[in-house]
Image (tube, grey):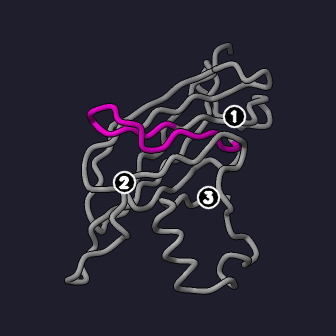
Amino acid sequence: MVGVKTAPALLVLFIAGCGSAAASSPGADAGNEAGGTDDAGPSDGGGSTDGGATTGTLHIAWTLQLGNGSATDCITANTRNIEVDVKTAAAVPVVSNTYYCVDMGETFTGLAPGTYLVELRLLDDTNSVTATAGAAVSVAAGAVVSATPLTLVLPGP
């Protein structure tokens, strides 16, 4: 399941605007999944006075590959979690959290337009980093952009 991460200020406005039913709806993502903390991305509340979007959305997805080039999955590779860091081009942290590897992707909303550096660190069962991947992605206001797929290559055959 792909989670959606929202800046807390935007989430508060959403809950206040929709009442408690939205906060308790089945399948609602309540925050981080595998531990860590959700650091909010820059957000101005998600809109401007003229009705135009002022923030964008970033979707990050990943695939796993063995050293011999064949595809694998998180369960077979014994990699439960993945650390996701999103930083501005000036290396200012926007998101730093740990998610379930099997989700195979995360979506972050409320990002100010600009270039972001995405870093993924795949963790094995002992929480040691077993593979990394990264990319630079430009986010535009009102757009959904993808940093996909980022391939994490595991050591070995």
Q: Above or below — where is 111 with respect to 26? A: above
C-alpha distance separating marks 2 and 1: 35 Å
Provide the residue designation for mark 1: 72
Amino acid type at circle 2 is Pro
Marks 3 and 1, the one that precedes in the sequence: 3
Provide the residue designation for mark 3: 3
Disc 2 + disc 3, Cβ < 8 Å: no
- The spot of residue 89 in percent (x, y) is 27, 36
**Which residue is more in the foreground, 145 or 151?**
145
Amino acid type at circle 3 is Gly
Q: Residue at x 67, y 13 (%)?
A: 156
Q: Which residues are magenta?
A: 85-100
C-alpha distance separating marks 3 and 1: 21 Å
Q: Is residue 70 left or right of residue 124?
A: left
Q: Above or below — where is 119 with respect to 142? A: above
Q: Is residue 112 left or right of residue 28?
A: left
Residue 24 belongs to magenta span: no
Q: Chief secondary structure of the magenta span? A: strand
